[in-house]
Amino acid sequence: MAKVKIQGSASGTGILTVVAPVTSTNRTITLPDATGTLLTEVADDAITLAKMASGTDGNIISYDASGDPVAIATGDDGQVLTSAGAGAPPAFEDAAGGNTPYFYAYSSADQSVSDYTNTKISCNTEAEDSGGNYDPSTNYRFTVPSGQGGKYFVTAGIKYVTSGEAIRQTFIFIYKNGSIYKDQDWTAGSESGSLNLKKKTNFISHIIDLAATDYIELWGSCDDDEDGSPSLRGFFLGYKIG
């Protein structure tokens, strides 16, 4: 019959106390049939894959806000692992669609403006808005959402109309964060407006680097022969390309 021997240490004065758990059930503790230290701190690189508990195929181990390990549930085929930011474990989500976010808005009516005065174009009707990031009611601007900074293709057009006065010059602007970023102008060729145009349309396109919270707007201006009040209406669209 094998025996259990408890042997004290020849040095040291500490007392090792073995405390029984609170239980009313008989327990059997089986010692391993091996030589070595039974209990100690785990050494670095001592835990092998074979010693880990079984899990679910496809799960990934991460940590929660408390620093405790958690299993990230297996996603569906084609999903990607997406960061949820600091303090939260990542998650499998559908991959973002191509060229999003995107928006397309236009003016529902002519907008009377002062002659030769930069004016924001009230593109107040949305045809497309992938994430609700375009404001069609107050600021008439697109704001880059969190995590969607990058390069955007932006294009716009403005139709200028005068009543009786010849158009001398037209201007179209893309504003970024309240300042002119890109502009395009057209001139009739003489101050008297020799072409005698009463209607003109300008277009502008550009690739813009935008960061989260940046915003862009469409502005325009028109100069006529009689310093009247021209009417403008426009369209404004953009989408992320990289």
Image: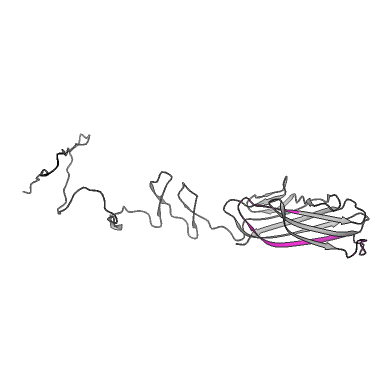
Q: Quadrant of residue 27?
A: top left
Residue 200: x %, y % from top left: 85, 60
Q: Is residue 177 magenta?
A: no
Any part of residue 198 in sight = no
Q: Is residue 210 magenta?
A: yes
Residue 217: x %, y % from top left: 72, 53
Q: Can you say which quadrant of the picture contains the C terminus?
A: bottom right
Any part of residue 162 in sight = yes
- Give the vertical position of 191 relative to 62 (above or below): below
* Residue with the most extreme left position: 1
Q: What colour scheme has been applied to the protein in the rendered image?
A: one colour
Residue 80: x %, y % from top left: 49, 58
Residue segment shown in magenta: 189-218
Whether residue 123 sits left or right of residue 113 in the image: it is left
Comparing 175 with 165, the one in front is 175
Whether residue 4 sits left or right of residue 199 in the image: it is left
- Give the vertical position of 183 relative to 6 (above or below): below
Q: Residue, x 78% and y 58% (percent of image)?
A: 172
Comparing 214 with 109, the one in front is 214
Residue 135: x %, y % from top left: 69, 48
Number of marks drawn: 0
Whether residue 65 sits left or right of residue 128 in the image: it is left
- Give the vertical position of 16 relative to 234 (above or below): above
